[in-house]
Image (spheres, rainbow, N blue to C red):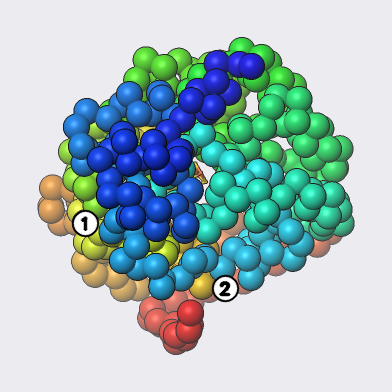
Amino acid sequence: MELWQQMIRDSVHTVDQIVEKFNIDRKVAEDLDEFFQARINPYYLSLIRYPGDPIWRQCVPDKIELDDIDSDEDPLMEDAMSPVPNITHRYPDRALFLVTSQCGLYCRFCTRKRKVGDYEKISMKGLESAFQYLEKHTEIRDVIMSGGDPLMLTDAMLEKIIQRLRAIPHIEIIRLGSKMPCVLPHRITPQLCNMLKKYHPIYLNTHFNHPWEITPESSKACTMLADAGIPVGNQMVLMKGVNDNPEVVKELMQKLLRIRVRPYYMYMADETKGANHFRTSIETGLNIIENLRGHTSGLAIPHFVIDAPGGGGKIPLLPNYVVHFDDEKIILRNYQKKIFSYKNYHDSHNPVKTNGKNGSNGKNGKTKQKEIKVTKIELPVLEEVEN
Ligand code: SF4
């Protein structure tokens, strides 16, 4: 058994352990156990500094989770957009492929709380129909392996799945969605990296939420992945009492860059059953971005998004930097609240003759130039979507 597997085995996960370790009322612990799995491995447990700190809040079951037990289980409608078991196909050219229900830690804020830890809900039995779906759908060029956490599989099992994906000619990119570099970095071994790098291009998105998660162990794991040529991105969830503070987020983003992890997304927390207590106001998120942009390197700034309830996908949000915009100019304010004007320029003033040589789709190498005349900005008619 490898070290990371021993640490999974030694995790806190039973009602008795939770009651004893965290001094939680037994009835509450039993009620929580009925709805949501708990697993706190010894490494992540060691990061807790005091009860209720940002690490504790992310992993220790809390009776507040029972307050919104009637909320939506699947706000992103992943199950409704699942054509076959284990696949969610929401966007045109990419698909989510759930390969296991298991995780190195069960996060209290997880969007898939309804599924993680339950072998019945993400079963290996569904893999064959998932592969067949991916083979048949030639428009899919990017597969995101998730779960659960795909790095909970053994190297051998993971390699079998990746080999099968690599045998599908239209799949160009394989992405791993894994929290292991953060919650159980011992999983990132030289053997794993050597196996993964045979199947490039492989990307990995991980999930650090607080600067205390950047430790010598997690730094080493991320560096090993980067050395294996695997670009690592980070998806942070904005959470009350964890990271709803511009200084904390700035420190996290800067530290991530130092360990060669590129901040990718900062999500508003989803409206998920048992996790609504983590939600913050949208202004909190906008204020964080406002305090990053211009104040630190652009490399350190993630896309701030809402994963739209009802399956609308990720929608970006930005503080408002546009003061005025018309045919002639745009008036902008910068991070210091200073105002600047930039003259508008319409392509119709000076059409570029490319003859298709810029890779455009002009037929027979000829690109038809269309005269575009912008007279005013028309706002689209908004359609309200019922969830
Ligand atoms: S590791 Fe990911 S899938 Fe697993 S519980 Fe945490 S957030 Fe959810």
Count the marks. 2
Q: Residue 111 versus residue 176: which sits nearer the camera? A: 111
Residue 23 in view in this figure: yes
Q: Is residue 163 left or right of residue 34?
A: right
Residue identified by numbered label 1: 284
Q: Position of residue 26 (x, y in %)?
A: 32, 49
User: Which residue is found at the position 47% from the left and 58% from the top?
Assistant: 35
From the image, tell me which residue sits under label 2. 371
Which element type, helix, strand or loop, lies under badge 1?
A: helix
The amino acid sitting under disc 2 is: Glu
Place of residue 353 in the rendered image (x, y in percent of width and height, measured from the top left): 64, 56
Q: What residue is rendered at 35% in x and 29% in y?
A: 45
Asked whether, in this view, residue 261 is left or right of residue 202, the answer is left
Q: Residues within 10 Å of mark 2 (few under 14, many from 20)?
A: few
Label 2, label 1: how far apart the Cα atoms are? 43 Å
The amino acid on which the numbered mark 1 sits, given as a three-letter code, is: Thr
**In the depicted view, which residue is nearer to us: 123 or 22?**
22
Q: Earlier in the sequence, mark 2 or mark 1?
A: 1
The residue nearer to you, when weighing 85 against 208, is 85
Instruction: Where is residue 93? Give x, y as percent.
Output: 69, 56
Which residue is most to the top? 190
- In the picture, residue 54 is in which quadrant? top left
Q: Is mark 2 within 8 Å of ligand 1?
A: no
Answer left or right for 185 relative to 100. left
